[in-house]
């Protein structure tokens, strides 16, 4: 224990060297910039900038990659809040409440909440990274195919939470997402499904392209159609860039809940910040005392989403570093390039470098907070840009972002198709967020179910074979029934008053 504490202290001393401080600030600022741009996900930002770390010491190089990773996850919330255009898939849920706050003239408050919640989620995830890595890594090892099937079903219960206007339309949207997720090569038999001769669809519809279309391109069409009414509401910023004590008290419970959600989702290979942000948003809504604000601009919704997706950053490093499993595959590639082998040796042979990286990861959260709070005032001015500039700018970013994913023009066409689909869904009050959930969770659930049945020779009892399966089943039941019980409980409390 004393040796570990000594290594932690030495890690902070090394991380606070002038070159590391400068590297942290610049990489975090660069990550925030990347996160603002639609199509450039956090993983893509790390991959694009990995070569600049080749000549750096291993610890500094990893700190730079960590700064880009954390900054990009937070940066996605800026465009999500201001122009309803999630910079990264991890900010899709943030757009639901954040943009409504912008339309009400509360862009400053929304950005401040996002920044503070991102900082808290990221910082708390560092605690898990430091002290609970072995236990959480072992939990990750318990997830097999049956558990992933139930996890996907539990994730689909979130649709009830994101469907603020109509549960039926939310379920239909989720079902549409599930159906679209079947496009591509069959994961078990290798048979083409609804590919129409397009090799681009081999791995299915790219979720990032779909998200850019559903949120960003559809927003262009909405702005072009109702530019006078909606943009006039968004121009006047009437609030201040600070949070009052009651507001801090309101966002604390969703931040803490989302920290736990983000850590657990982060350790699971194949899951990620997008799933976590929706789960965090859903739980914020489920336990809120102000449910009437959701769908109209709720700071609790923004806090729940942003805390969860930033808590994933620390959680995802646990299996990557402890077990050599890659949730953050690009970051693991960075370790290998710097001559380090992910796994238990990082905590023995390379312990000094590992704890320097951990310390840098903690300090990066403070850098992100400083950049976010100092830049909020400038960021908020984006909502006041005229349509003549904003609309073509978003179109260019959407096209470039979609093309840059795989340098494929077909994916630009896919993005445009989803843009029209997203526009129609918004016109008829269907839920784009529910469709995104179906797209993400469909392949996870299908692979989990079919692999489970294949390994058990078609015996469905394998889906009920472990305590973890039953725990997830219980969570699914709670997720489905809790809205009904919560509504009854609220009505009873209202009647008593």
Image (cartoon, rainbow, N blue to C red):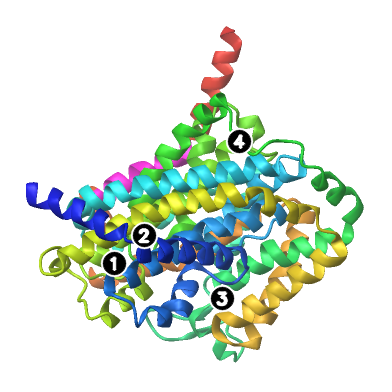
Mark earlier in primary sequence (2, 3): 2
Residue linked to disc 2:
149
Report, in whole angstroms, how far the alpha carbon at label 3 lies from the one at label 1.
Answer: 24 Å
Magenta segment, which residues? 468-481
The total of numbered circles placed on residues is: 4
Q: Nearer the viewer, mark 2 or mark 1?
A: 2
Q: Are marks 2 and 1 in contact (CB under 8 Å)?
A: yes
Residue 152 in picture, x, y percent from top left:
42, 57
Instruction: Point out the frontmost of discs 4 and 2.
Output: 4
**Nearest to viewer (mark 4 / mark 3):** 4
State which tag comes first along the sequence, 4 or 2: 2
How far apart are the alpha carbons under marks 2 and 1?
9 Å
Is 473 covered by the magenta stretch? Answer: yes
Instruction: Single out the mark in the foreground, 3 or 1.
Output: 3
| x and y percentages locating residue 398 in the rendered image | 69, 73
CA–CA distance in space, label 4 to label 2: 42 Å
441 on left or right of 410: left
Q: Position of residue 397 (x, y in %)?
A: 69, 73
Query: Going by the picture, which residue comes out furthest to the front?
Result: 18
> Which corner quadrant of the image does residue 390 belong to?
bottom right
Quadrant in the rendering for residue 491? top right
Q: Which residue is mark 4?
A: 242
- Please rate how many residues cluster around mark 4, counting C-alpha atoms within 10 Å: few if below 14, some from 14 to 19, many from 20: some
Instruction: Give residue 130's position: percent from left, percent from top.
Output: 24, 51
> Could you say whether the residue bearing mark 1 is in a helix, strand or loop?
helix
Q: Earlier in the sequence, mark 1 or mark 4?
A: 4
Residue at image point 70% right, 64% down: 216
Numbered disc 4: secondary structure = loop
């Amino acid at each position: 224990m004393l040796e570990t504490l000594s290594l932690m202290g030495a890690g902070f001393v090394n991380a606070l060297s002038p070159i590391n401080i400068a590297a942290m600030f610049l990489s975090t600022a660069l990550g925030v910039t990347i996160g603002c741009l639609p199509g450039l996900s956090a993983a893509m930002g790390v991959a694009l900038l990995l070569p600049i770390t080749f000549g750096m010491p291993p610890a500094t190089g990893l700190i730079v990659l960590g700064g880009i990773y954390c900054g990009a996850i937070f940066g996605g919330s800026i465009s999500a809040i201001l122009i309803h255009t999630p910079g990264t898939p991890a900010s899709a849920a943030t757009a639901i409440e954040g943009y409504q706050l912008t339309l009400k003239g509360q862009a400053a408050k929304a950005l401040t909440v996002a920044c503070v919640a991102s900082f808290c989620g990221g910082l708390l995830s560092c605690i898990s990274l430091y002290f609970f890595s072995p236990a959480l890594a072992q939990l990750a090892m318990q997830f097999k195919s049956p558990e992933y099937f139930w996890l996907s079903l539990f994730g689909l219960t979130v649709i009830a939470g994101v469907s603020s206007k109509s549960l039926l339309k939310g379920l239909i949207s989720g079902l549409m997402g599930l159906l679209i997720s079947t496009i591509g090569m069959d994961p078990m038999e290798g048979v083409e499904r609804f590919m129409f001769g397009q090799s681009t669809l081999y791995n299915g519809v790219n979720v990032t392209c779909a998200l850019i279309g559903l949120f960003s391109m559809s927003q262009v069409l909405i702005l072009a159609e109702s530019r006078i009414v909606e943009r006039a509401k968004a121009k006047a910023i009437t609030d201040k860039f600070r949070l009052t004590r009651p507001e801090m008290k309101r966002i604390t419970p969703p931040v803490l809940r989302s920290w736990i959600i983000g850590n657990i989702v982060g350790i699971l290979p194949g899951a990620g910040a997008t799933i976590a942000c929706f789960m965090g948003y859903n739980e914020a809504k489920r336990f809120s005392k102000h449910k009437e604000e959701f769908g109209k601009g709720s700071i609790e919704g923004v806090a729940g989403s942003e805390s969860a997706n930033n808590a994933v950053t620390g959680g995802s490093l646990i299996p990557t570093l402890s077990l050599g499993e890659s949730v953050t595959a690009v970051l693991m590639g960075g370790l290998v390039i710097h001559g380090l082998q992910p796994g238990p040796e990082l905590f023995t042979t390379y312990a000094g470098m590992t704890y320097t990286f951990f310390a840098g990861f903690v300090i990066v959260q403070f850098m992100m907070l400083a950049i976010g709070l100092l830049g909020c005032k400038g960021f908020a001015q984006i909502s006041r840009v005229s349509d003549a500039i904003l609309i073509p700018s978003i179109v260019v970013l959407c096209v470039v972002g979609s093309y840059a994913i795989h340098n494929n023009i077909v994916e630009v066409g896919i993005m445009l198709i989803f843009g029209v689909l997203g526009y129609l869904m918004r016109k008829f009050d269907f839920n784009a967020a529910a469709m995104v959930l179906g797209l993400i969770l469909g392949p996870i659930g299908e692979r989990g179910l079919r692999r489970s049945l294949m390994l058990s020779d078609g015996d469905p009892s394998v889906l009920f074979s472990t305590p973890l399966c039953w725990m997830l089943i219980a969570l699914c039941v709670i997720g489905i029934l809790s809205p009904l019980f919560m509504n009854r409980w609220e009505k009873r409390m209202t009647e008593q008053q």
